[in-house]
Structures are given as C-alpha cells and as structure tokens.
Amino acid sequence: MPYVIGEACIDVMDRSCMDECPVDCIYEGKRKLYINPLECIDCGACEPACPVTAISSDRKVPEEKAAFAEDNARFFDLPLPGRAEAIGAPGGAAAVGVIGVDTELVAGHGAA
C-alpha cells in the first residue's frame, strides 16, 4: 500500500488530492477519502496537495496512526456496510462515483 489517508481527513475531505492523482485511485467514503492500494502507483502527487497533511507513505505512518493505514486497505478488501461485495480494484474512482459509506473505524470515529 504505497500511500494512505489518515485520521486528519475525517470530516474534512478537501479533495485536492483527487485532482492531483494521475491514476484516479482516491475514493470517497461518507466522512473520509481512501487510496486504493492496488491502483496507487506510489507517485506521491497527492501528499503535498493535502491541506491537512492526512496523506503519507505507508512506510512513514506513525505507530499511533497505524490503525488508519490498515483501515485504508480494509475499505477495499472487505464488504462495507450496506454492500454485498468488496470494492476491490474497479479501475478508478470516477468509474464508481462516491461510495458514500465508511469502514467501521471511520464511521465510529469521535462517537461518544
């Protein structure tokens, strides 16, 4: 998984990273964006475009944020709530549009 989007993106979703991605591998959930690890080419164009510094290389994710790196892959690997199948690697975010649902970690983030 070359690049991941972390906790700082939750409820922000600036989408500047989506404009910079040359392979359209950034997908939109309900509260956060996710980078498809099978489609990302590890170019790094998204990282400097993020105004909240939510994007980093999977090799540079701080230990206390590791759960979000794992969760980024989970978004594509496992069926999300309300969906029968996993997203997988459909070949670009534009082809599927807004997913509109998040992983359990992100959906429950900040819940009291």
Image (cartoon, rainbow, N blue to C red):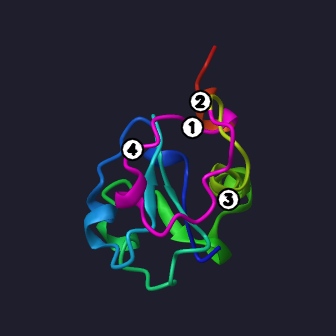
Amino acid at the residue labelled 4 = Val
Pointer 1 residue: 102
Label 2 element class: helix
Judged by depth in the image, the label closer to the viewer, 4 or 1, is: 4
Mark positioned earlier in the residue sequence (1 or 2): 1
- Find residue 67 and name its label: none
Q: Label the magenta part by its dominant secondary structure.
A: loop
Amino acid at the residue labelled 2 = Ala
Mark positioned earlier in the residue sequence (3 or 1): 3
Percent from the top left, x then y, of residue 99?
A: 46, 42
Q: Assess disc 2: are there few (<14), some (14-19) or many (≥20) residues with their C-alpha within 10 Å of its C-alpha.
A: some
Q: Are the residues at dot 1 and dot 2 in contact (C-beta closer than 8 Å)?
A: yes
Judged by depth in the image, the label closer to the viewer, 2 or 4, is: 4
Magenta-highlighted residues: 83-104
| 16 horizontally vs 8: left or right | left
Pointer 4 residue: 98
Report how far apart the C-alphas of labels 3 and 4 lie in the structure.
17 Å
Label 3 element class: helix
Pointer 2 residue: 107
Amino acid at the residue labelled 3 = Ala
Report how far apart the C-alphas of labels 2 and 4 lie in the structure.
16 Å
Residue 64 among magenta residues: no
| 81 horizontally vs 57: left or right | right
Q: Which residue is drawn at 38% across and 69% down?
A: 24
Amino acid at the residue labelled 1 = Asp
Pointer 3 residue: 73
